[in-house]
Amino acid sequence: MCGIVGYVGRSAGRVNTEHKALDVVLEGLRRLEYRGYDSAGIAVVADGAISSRKKSGKLSNLIAELEAHPLPDALTGIGHTRWATHGGPTDLNAHPHLSDGGKLALIHNGIIENFAELKQELVAKGVTFLSETDTEVAAALIGDIYRNQLGGDNASGGLTRAMELACQRLEGAFTLLAVHADQPDVVVAARRNSPLVVGLGEGENFLGSDVSGFIDYTRRAVELGQDQIVTITADTVAITDFFGAPAEGKEYYVNWDPASAEKGGFPSFMEKEIHDQPDAVLQTLLGRSDVDGKLTLDELRIDTELLKSVDKIIVLACGTSAYAGQVAKYAIERWCRIPTEVELSHEFRYRDPIVDANTLIVSISQSGETMDTLMAVRYAKEQGAKTVSICNTNGSTIPRESDAVLYTHAGPEIAVASTKAFLAQIAAAYLLGLYLAQLRGNKFQGEIKDILADLGKIPAKIQQILDNADAIKKLGHDMVDAKSVLFLGRHVGFPVAMEGALKLKELAYIHAEGFAAGELKHGPIALIEEGQPVFVVVPSPRGRDSLHAKVVSNIQEVRARGAKTIVIAEEGDEAVKAYAEHVIYIPETPTLLAPLLSTVPLQIFALALASAKGYDVDQPRNLAKSVTVE
Ligand code: F6R
């Protein structure tokens, strides 16, 4: 899940370019820092040599290092921001790693699974290693092939050929970017199971883990396929497979506005992204139905007959995205009457799941790169299932490898803790559920139209919550010393409770747990003692099956044991007042859609509490935005 940038510009003698490799690479790293931020490094090729700097800690440490020890001006460079896998976050383990007597520099995202075996082989040849990383082994392997197998002969393919031969031996997941002092105007990259995109410029070309790595310079991008190598110069982009056979990438236009990747005046990306939510939901709903409520999900190119024959849905996702799936399960089963399971991707494929051609796999992933989910989708495909991806990142691996895709249009989510992607995922999953119901005739068109109309009112209701957030912010500040917070919910409120707890754990590093309110009496109620804060997500009193009354009883049960209750309830719900220390009201909405509203105060609370503690809410400790290792 590291961030990777590569750049080759043309010499100023040939074209009037003012871009320096160092500036371009640092800017890319700044935008990609969300992918990992425990160390950063950069290498440039100048004056027939590689010069590199690397530093543990955030990118700012590397920048300070560069100020103290500047790099020479260069037109070719690579840069890396790391999330440690093999070897702790130290200066030595930071990338780039050098080989071939310091003439080759390599950066890497992923895990090389057979690195120990390769290392042994290289050590036997006399290679010495400075770090504990698998990356240094890959660097040494490429360097060894370049120097000893190919004789350092650039006429026979040089660095590109060395990369091909090395990739044939590497196992696992990797994006690799290499530069060599003997080929000063070339960056060679390879990808297997890890993301890499090419940016096409005028007299300059770029590489990035995703398009944010070069969005300031070009919107023209090329998506690379699996097991491909790309060699860029200032004027050319050559793609091959790992055996040197020519291959093609898919060019596309990036319609993200660079400004939308900025904070927009908010103190943090997370706060901005919480405020982006009305638009994220709106954009996700837009253009997907006509005036009669007929859904036309254009990107969902999957045979309608196949969709009609689906007899089971399995939602695969991790973390927040899995909670979105759990919310969607209630709606999909209700609207389509198709049994729907939600499974954590990393648990799925190791338990011999029952999947066949009538199973529809719905993967949910903001990044589209989560390795656990990618592997689970691949496994399901091998078993013959049809796969639909709900994803926020255009051109990322999971949607590319799925049979169909339904993009959430939340815009780039930079803060590590997911907020707007979660609401957009729920909205998209609801569209999918309604589409299946329409196709299979489970709902009349008028009913679908009514639900879509209710969904259409959600953005304004989220805005209303955002405009009246002072009380929940104050609560966050007042609870700065809380040691543990519990969250209860029932029905769709249960995954919301778990998401509320996850946000608090991630941001404020305090113990938090979400429970099904009905489960409390089966054990967890033993946790309640005097003063224990408990959030309760209360369903609408207008909802079905006396659910509201049951949850009100649950509030009373914890309160009777000393809990301090904070209740999220629908406007006009007077019944909860008597049992709550604090009531946070959200606008009226049908029960199934309520998570799109009830989640928002919980996000604001976690943000406020973590901010009051002085924590970095955009980059919480130990986390990375895109988890591209299993
Ligand atoms: C939590 C969070 C994570 C992600 C999870 C899946 O705030 O962001 O739990 O939801 O790592 O990531 P994606 O959706 O990119 O597959």
Image: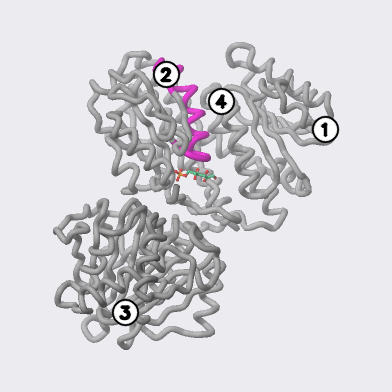
- Label 4 sits on residue: 492
Question: Magenta residues?
Answer: 317-340
Task: Tell me the mark number nearer the camera, choosing from 4 and 1.
Answer: 1
- Label 1 sits on residue: 529
Q: Indicate yes or no whether the magenta region holds residue 444.
A: no
Q: Give the CA separation, mark 3 to mark 4.
A: 54 Å
Going from N to C along the chain, the mark reached first, 2 or 1, is 2
Residue 198 in view here: no
**Residue at the spot 30% in from the left edge and 34% down from the top edge:** 381
Name the dominant secondary structure of the magenta segment.
Answer: helix
Task: Tell me the mark number nearer the camera, choosing from 2 and 3.
Answer: 2
155 relative to 581, above or below: below
Going from N to C along the chain, the mark reached first, 4 or 1, is 4
Q: Is mark 1 within 8 Å of ligand 1?
A: no
Question: Is residue 240 toward the left or the right of residue 48 in the image?
Answer: left
**Residue at the spot 40% in from the left edge and 29% down from the top edge:** 352
Q: Tell me whether the residue at label 3 lies in contact with that at label 4, contact meaning CB atoms closer than 8 angstroms.
A: no
**Residue at the spot 67% in from the left edge and 29% down from the top edge:** 488
Task: Tell me the mark number nearer the camera, choosing from 2 and 4.
Answer: 2
Q: Position of residue 54 (x, y in %)?
A: 49, 74
Going from N to C along the chain, the mark reached first, 3 or 1, is 3
Going from N to C along the chain, the mark reached first, 2 or 3, is 3
Q: Quadrant of residue 589?
A: top right
Q: Tell me whether the residue at label 2 lies in contact with that at label 4, contact meaning CB atoms closer than 8 angstroms.
A: no
Q: Residues within 10 Å of mark 1 (few under 14, many from 20)?
A: some
What's the amino acid at mark 4? Val
Q: Give the CA separation, mark 3 to mark 1.
A: 63 Å
